[in-house]
Amino acid sequence: MIGRLNHVAIAVKDLAAATALYRDTLGAHVSQQLPQPDHGVTVVFVELPNSKIELLEPLGADSPIAKFLERNPDGGVHHICYEVEDILAARDRLKAQGARVLGSGEPRIGAHGKPVLFLHPKDFNGTLVELEQA
Ligand code: CO
């Protein structure tokens, strides 16, 4: 059911510093900052030949990544995103198999302008999983 790895997301405290690290030290192409107030993060995309890295910085008072950064003050891998062809079919299949979908269970529009859902990390080997409609 899952398809390509769309991105790996890394939470960071300082997006400008993380951008400089990827651009200058690692030599990657990094996008402009994209504030996502609905998701409580500011994002940049690191374009790799075969996938993307998203660097996430908290935005606003109750950012969903604020607690994560309290526990991981150096930053860390926050989630991985797999593409699915039909996000509603994927959700229904996962729920039928006992996996927990976070939030309302309805897809929201993610950083790429496509519907996304998040799955409970306790159901997926301690890893927060994002599904994105391909
Ligand atoms: Co993501």
Image: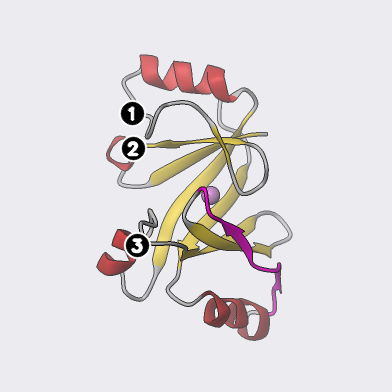
Residue 35's spot in the image, x, y percent? 59, 60
Ligand 1 contact, mark 3 (Cβ < 8 Å): no
Mark in front: 2 vs 3: 3
Helix, strand or loop status at disc 2: loop
Residue located beneath label 3 in the image: 66
13 or 36, nearer to the observer:
36
Q: Which residues are magenta?
A: 27-38
Q: Amino acid at mark 1?
A: Arg
Marks 1 and 2 in Cβ contact (< 8 Å): yes
Farthest-out residue, bottom? 24
Residue located beneath label 2 in the image: 120
Q: Say which label, 1 or 2, has the lower sequence index.
A: 1
Residue 128's spot in the image, x, y percent? 39, 45
Q: Amino acid at mark 2?
A: His
Q: Quadrant of residue 30?
A: bottom right
Residue located beneath label 1 in the image: 100
Q: Is residue 49 left or right of residue 41?
A: right
